[in-house]
């Protein structure tokens, strides 16, 4: 399937961009091409929507062991966050001690360098969350 135009034209790397189904008003993140509620009726009806990136912690886990790229940050916190728009996502919480985090805590998204591909010189960015 072709990458939709908006995905290429939107500076999505630095924003949380979801999609909204114009048929049933449900918001999805990550973006979807088809609404799982409306199926065929949603074709062509999903439009990009910029999420504010603010929400609250639904649940979290403190991880003491992890993939190599996180090595410098162990222990780190992974949380399920419900954004104010009603969508849930899983993200790392940064700048927060493991004894500070609480269920229901307000958080907001921040864009961080995730890593660098030395040979290609490509820098990867992604979203993480901090205390709001
Ligand atoms: Zn729908």
Image (cartoon, rainbow, N blue to C red):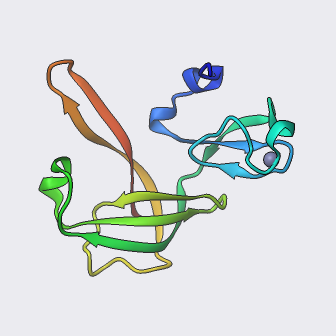
Residue 132 seen: no
- 14, above or below 60, in the image: above
Left or right of 107 on screen, residue 66 = left
Closer to us: 1 or 46: 1
Q: Could you tell me which quadrant the N terminus lies in? A: top right
At 50% from the left and 64% from the top, the residue drawn is 81
Residue 42 placement, left or right of 70: right
Q: Which residue is drawn at 45% across and 58% down?
A: 90
Compared to residue 34, the image places residue 56 above or below, namely below
From the viewer's perspective, tell me whether residue 97 is left or right of residue 46.
Answer: left
Q: Which residue is drawn at 25% across and 73% down?
A: 97
Q: In this view, does 70 lie above or below 84?
A: above
Quadrant in which the C terminus appears: bottom left
- Picture coordinates of residue 96 (x, y %)? 29, 69
When the figure is inspected, residue 108 is found, relative to residue 104, above or below; the finding is above
Q: Nearer the viewer, residue 24 or 110?
A: 24
Q: Residue at x 87, y 38 (%)?
A: 41
Q: How many marks overall?
A: 0
Based on the displayed image, in which of its 4 quarters is residue 91 positioned?
bottom left
Which percent across, then down, holds residue 20?
73, 44
User: Where does the image place residue 36, in percent across and percent down from the top left?
Assistant: 73, 48
Q: Position of residue 64 (x, y in %)?
A: 18, 69
Left or right: residue 42 versus residue 76 is right
Quadrant in the picture for residue 54: bottom right
Q: In which quarter of the image is residue 30?
A: top right
Residue 75 seen by the camera: yes
């Amino acid at each position: 399937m072709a990458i939709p135009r908006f995905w290429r034209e939107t500076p999505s790397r630095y924003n949380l961009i979801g999609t909204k189904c114009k048929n049933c008003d449900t918001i999805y993140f990550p973006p979807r091409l088809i609404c799982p509620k409306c199926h065929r009726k949603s074709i062509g009806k999903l439009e990009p929507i910029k999420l504010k990136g603010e929400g609250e912690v639904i649940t979290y886990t403190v991880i003491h062991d992890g993939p190599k790229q996180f090595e410098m940050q162990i222990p780190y916190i992974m949380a399920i966050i419900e954004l104010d728009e009603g969508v849930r996502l899983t993200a790392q919480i940064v700048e927060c001690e493991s004894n500070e985090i609480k269920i229901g805590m307000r958080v907001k998204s921040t864009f961080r360098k995730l890593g660098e591909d030395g040979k290609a010189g490509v820098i990867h960015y992604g979203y993480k969350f901090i205390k709001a």
